[in-house]
Amino acid sequence: MNFRKEDRVRARLRERGTHPGLICIFSALERCCTYQPWHDKKTGKTFLRPHDGKCLHYYFYFLDEDLGLVFVRVPTWCPFRLQIYFNGHEWLASQLRRQGISLSVPRHSLYRDRRLDPRATIARCVEYESTARTTPKSLSAGSAVQRPQVFN
């Protein structure tokens, strides 16, 4: 069954609310770069050679209080290239809200209060302490996570 993951995530967010934590988990069979065992009869050596194939991927969708909507794409086959995706607009919006700066977040853009200097606003938001954190709070081991809804 084909469906858009983002549509399912939005529906799940309407059901569960917008508190931080795990939203849902999807699995999908997708193309991937992997390796195949190969034996060269001329040299007598066995090795792994690159191969295009399909493998199962898991998508873990989280709502992080700093980064907003995040998903982690986890392949189930070697070389296990873990990918983490998030939207920079959500991160910037959360930083602005923490500083008490009013804004609205329409799809794919930010509107700011006209009284603000955008350069100063961004400079205040991009500080070493806020960007140095490598693990979103919703992904850390001590996070309270609700039972996810799993789709196959």
Image (cartoon, grey):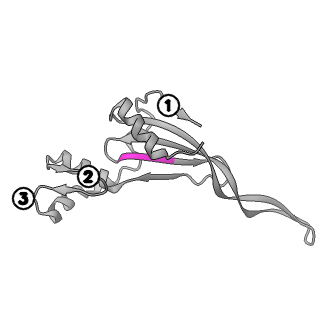
Question: How would you rate the neighbour count of disc 3 (Cα within 10 Å): few for under 14, some for 14-19, many for 20 or more?
Answer: few
Under circle 3, the secondary element is: loop
In the image, which disc is placed on residue 106?
2
Whether the residues at callouts 3 and 2 have beta carbons within 8 Å, the answer is no
Question: How would you rate the neighbour count of disc 1 (Cα within 10 Å): few for under 14, some for 14-19, many for 20 or more?
Answer: few
The answer to whether 14 is drawn above or below residue 79 in the figure is above
Q: Which residue is mark 3?
A: 115
Under circle 2, the secondary element is: loop
For the point 48% across and 36% down, the residue is: 24
Q: Nearer the viewer, residue 29 or 45?
A: 29
91 in the magenta segment: no
Tag 2: amino acid: Pro
Confirm whether residue 21 shows in the render.
Answer: no
Residue range (magenta): 68-72
Estimate the x, y position of residue 119 in percent, counting from the top left: 17, 65
Tag 3: amino acid: Arg
In the image, which disc is placed on residue 149?
1
For the point 64% across and 56% down, the residue is: 31
Tag 1: amino acid: Gln
